[in-house]
Image (cartoon, rainbow, N blue to C red):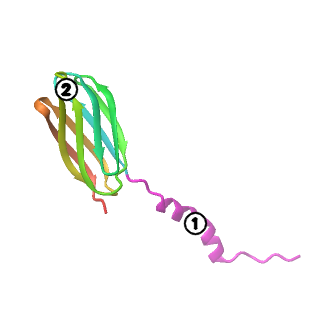
Amino acid sequence: MMRRPLSRGLISAVVLSPLFLAAGCHSYHIDTTIENRTGAAIKLLEVDYPEASFGADQVAAGADFHYRIQVEGSGQLKIMYTGVDGKQVQIKGLELVQRQQGRLEIVLLPDGKAEFHPEFTPGS
């Protein structure tokens, strides 16, 4: 039985297929850090963002909380937590859009205030 040599097109397809598949599976994410600089521990931290949320039972005074998010859709980021006095704090944050990626630092300050320090590449 005589073997025929493989065509260049077939060889190229076999070699390049994994590269095309890997390029199509990019996962966009934002590495988020929440810094508690309120001066006291906070409880029941919840961060809502388009199509999802995350949180922590407690974040000690001066502590940081890290979480990686993937934004699906567009909308405003919102933060809620219970302060040392038992009062619920609600903070409206920046707008997020699908496929943004990068880093976001959120600094929780006294009196229910916050600073947002985004380092994003554009989304779609």
> Which quadrant holds residue 113?
top left
* Residue 41: % across, % down: 23, 22
> Which quadrant holds residue 108?
top left
Task: State whether the magenta stretch is mostly helix, strand or loop.
Answer: helix
> Which quadrant holds residue 45?
top left
Q: Residue at x 16, y 40 (%)?
A: 115
Is residue 101 one of those drawn in magenta? no
- Please report whichever mark, 1 or 2, sits nearer to the chain's N-terminal start: 1
Q: Is residue 57 left or right of residue 42?
A: right
Q: Which mark is residue 17?
A: 1
Which residue is at the front of the view, 92 or 67?
92
Q: Which residues are magenta?
A: 1-28
Q: Nearer the viewer, mark 1 or mark 2?
A: 2
* Residue 73: % across, % down: 33, 57
Type of amino acid at the residue the image marks with label 1: Ser
Q: Which mark is residue 83?
A: 2
Relative to 59, say whether 115 is above or below.
below
Relative to 115, say whether 36 is above or below.
above
Q: Residue at x 19, y 22 (%)?
A: 84
Which residue is at the front of the view, 53 or 9?
53
Q: Is residue 103 left or right of residue 86?
A: right
Relative to 119, say whether 12 is above or below.
below
Residue furthest right in the image: 1
Check disc 2: other Cα within 10 Å, few if <14, some if 14-19, many if 20+. Answer: some
Is residue 17 one of those drawn in magenta? yes
Query: In which quadrant of the rendered image does the C terminus lie?
Result: bottom left
Residue furthest left in the image: 111
The secondary structure type at the circle numbered 2 is loop
Type of amino acid at the residue the image marks with label 2: Gly
Query: In which quadrant of the rendered image does the N terminus lie?
Result: bottom right
